[in-house]
Image: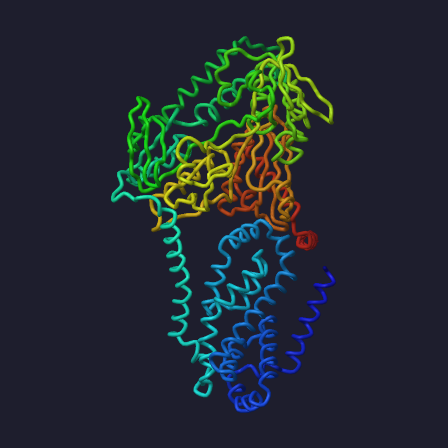
Amino acid sequence: MKYRKLALLAVIGILAGLYVHFDLGQYLNLQALKERQAAIETFRSANLGLTVAGYFVVYIIATALSIPGAALLTLAGGAIFGLLWGTLIVSFASTIGATLAFLMSRFLLRDWVSQRFGQRLAAIDEGIKREGAFYLFTLRLVPAFPFFLVNLLFGLTAMKTRAYYIASQLGMLAGTVVYVNAGTQLARLDSLSGILSPALIGSFVLLGIFPLIARKLVEMVRMNKVFAHWKKPARFERNLVVIGGGSAGLVTAYIAAAVKAKVTLVEKHKLGGDCLNTGCVPSKALIRSAKFLSHITRSQEFGIATAQANFEFADVMKRVQSVIKTVEPHDSAERYSGLGVDVIQGSANIVSPWEVEITREDGSTQRLSTRSIVIATGARPFVPPIPGIEEVGYLTSDNVWNLRELPQRLVVLGGGPIGSEMTQAFARLGAKVTQVEMAPRIMIREDPEVSELVTRRFRAEGIDVLLNHRAKQFVVENGEKVLIAEHDGQDVRIPFDAVLVAVGRAANLKGFGLEELGVRTGRTVETNEFLQTNYPNIYAAGDVAGPFQFTHTAAHQAWYAAVNALFDPLKKFKADYSVIPWATFVEPEVARVGLNELEAKEKGIPYEVTTYDIDDLDRAIADSEAHGFIKVLTVPGKDKILGVTIVGEHAGDLIAEYVLAMKQGIGLNKILGTIHIYPTLAEANKYVAGNWKKAHAPQRLLAWVERFHAWRRG
């Protein structure tokens, strides 16, 4: 491959050298063409086939090598062959030449660009895949944008050659006709500016706008096709109906009410969704109690000879419920009603693209017409179809909060964030916990050293972490529950009293009319970049839409869903997932934003790594929490942050500085130049920036500075 690239570069270099050596540019001007017009016409009359072939080849070479003068050659086509044949010849020659330039750019440069800008190029390729032909067609219609640059830039993308050729041929046709026609009037032209007059440029700009107008018309046709079988109401009772009262639904309804839209929020169970009732809030309350107990077992680290705690598991779970009740008013019907949201407790069913039928708790029904709908129905724990699981009974993150007796032997299926958090919490509360993970490590989305650090901590706390163990079957033997797992081809028997299933979550897609309506779904509701479903007025946000299942991401999506649903077609925004942070609240805590090394390698994105070990931080030492690290990925040679992983105490809080930095384009140099309070854990962010600076110190400059100081000492 390398030698073929060198050979192609050599050929291009030779052709460019010949062009310069023989001063071929002298023939590519209007005056030269007019002077030779009579001779060219005489030659064409005597040798038509040779003239066509020669002109065709020259045009292709000039376009392929991006030689200046394509406009002049097009004029020549009109002058030599007339409007009809000139247009035909130039159209094919210019498109073939442009496609060759496109392919050469791809062959010579795409691999290099992909290595340096892999993540950005992937996003561009995704856009090109969806609408590349349309945008290429638009650019081809506007000659003010250099065609040779279009060829080179599109060659760096993943656009298919066939699509490139067709869009180019069609897009350049209008401009070709204009230039060829001008060539038929060559004797009257004094300069190329006669062709590129303001009026003509204005016409081309209008031609460039036309595809945008055409696209809107196409969207209208598609919309009419989607809505063809439905009768649209003459007026609407609501601007927006939101189905689901979790994080995404609440924020969507709040935004709608804030901009004075008439909005109804429907929730079948409890407002606040999983986060308040069965997820974030109760799990963090349980983790806090468990952490307190872990500190008692570590009393000697803090200079306390002995310490003990007497507690009942039921009281810990009672505290969890108390925390939920304390937070509950933040998500209550009373609060949102006061904000202007029409809150209804009941089940919603979408009966048409503009109508939602609501069945209240008392059995009464109500049908509301609405201009737009937002689906925010969330997700539920996924329970794998393992033989015997129904017979032994199982816990999930939904019902584990009903426990009032601590299971003496608990099996946790799953090594992801939920499974790992619950594993450590229940172990600290006194259960004998066995964590079963079929992958080679827990927390598989994190870098290997992160998984290793957490696994070591788990095992040090008495947790039996079983990796590469696949759950095969649940059985009851002599009144004892047993999990049979496969490991290295052998069956491993794990007796237990309770099993907690934490292997992922599945979107709630059934029971509210999506199938009947024909809304496209897969593992989640299928949406475009504006969070629209295949019905343009129906949106989805939160866990039901993906791609992330975090409370803060659901709230983030809710803004886009609400604004787009209320203000399209006047204005709509593409959902931005460029900077998404998350944390796993085990100990040591793990937080991340952007890329880690695992993802950077998978995507082929070049990076540099800078680390700082928190065991060297004064505050961490004082708190007896001197463990963990910060790892920052940056663009090679630059301080631009690609991603950050933090492992250690309060990692979820420390990551916020990097989330802000990445969102606002702030690099490590500015973090280094920011004052951080001493002694705090946040100083670690400054120290890792300092490590980056040391690694990129200007050594030559420092050598000269050293000489300067030596000279000043005399």
Q: Which quadrant would the C terminus be assigned to in this image?
A: bottom right
Q: Nearer the viewer, residue 519 or 316?
A: 519
Give left or right: position of 550 versus 481: left
Residue 637 in percent (x, y) is at 63, 51
Q: Which quadrant would the N terminus be assigned to in this image?
A: bottom right
Residue found at the far front of this picture: 229
Residue 430 in percent (x, y) is at 59, 13
Q: Quadrant of residue 532?
A: top left
Q: Residue at x 65, y 62 (%)?
A: 108
Residue 550 in percent (x, y) is at 49, 33
Q: Nearer the viewer, residue 241 or 633?
A: 241
**Residue 619 shows in the view:** no
Give left or right: position of 234 versus 68: left
Q: Is residue 366 above or below residue 665?
A: above
**Residue 285 shows in the view:** yes
Q: Nearer the viewer, residue 525 or 406?
A: 525
For the image, the number of numbered tags is 0
Q: Quadrant of residue 510?
A: top left
Residue 286 in percent (x, y) is at 51, 19
Q: Residue at x 56, y 31 (%)?
A: 651
